[in-house]
Image (tube, rainbow, N blue to C red):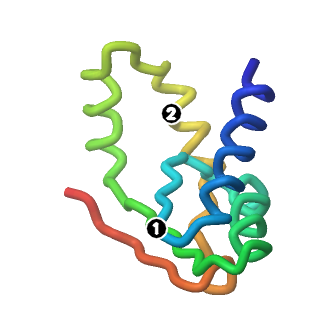
Amino acid sequence: MNGQVQQAAKERLKQLLRRPGTIVWDATNLRQDLRAPLIQLGFDYGARVSIVALKTPVPTLEARNRKRQHPIPAAMLMRQLEKLEWPEINEAHGIVVWNSP
């Protein structure tokens, strides 16, 4: 059902983009190819698109994962980190990278 959920979320995003105001889309989107369609949608609707990326030390990520109600396997977390593509300056109108303790 992931595809249906994603499609419904995009349709809702389109509805919101038709109105004035600020929209926050909270998603992992580790790779540029996952971010691009959402960013392009914002561009298509004339929105100012900003990316906020949180940079968290690996030991902190591991500790937080262990405390989750449903932690993911440590190997999966490492695979996600290996796939991580930090946003590049040309992806959006603005990019903010916050260092998380």
Identify whether 24 is placed above or below 81. below
Which of disc 2 and disc 1 is earlier in sequence?
A: 1
User: Residue 64 lies in what quarter of the image?
Assistant: top left
Q: Residue 87: x and y, percent?
A: 59, 71
* Label 2 sits on residue: 77
Q: Residue at x 47, y 21 (%)?
A: 72
Element marked by disc 2: helix
Q: Residue at x 38, y 60 (%)?
A: 54
Q: Residue 25: x and y, percent?
A: 53, 53
* Closer-to-camera residue (97/73): 97
| Residue 48 as seen in the image, left or right of residue 21 | right
Front position among marks 1 and 2: 1
User: Residue 42 lies in what quarter of the image?
Assistant: bottom right
Identify whether 31 is placed above or below 43. above
Q: Which mark is residue 53?
A: none
Alpha carbon separation for disc pair 1 and 2: 31 Å
Q: Which mark is residue 22?
A: 1
Crowding at mark 1 (Cα within 10 Å: few <14, some 14-19, many 20+): few
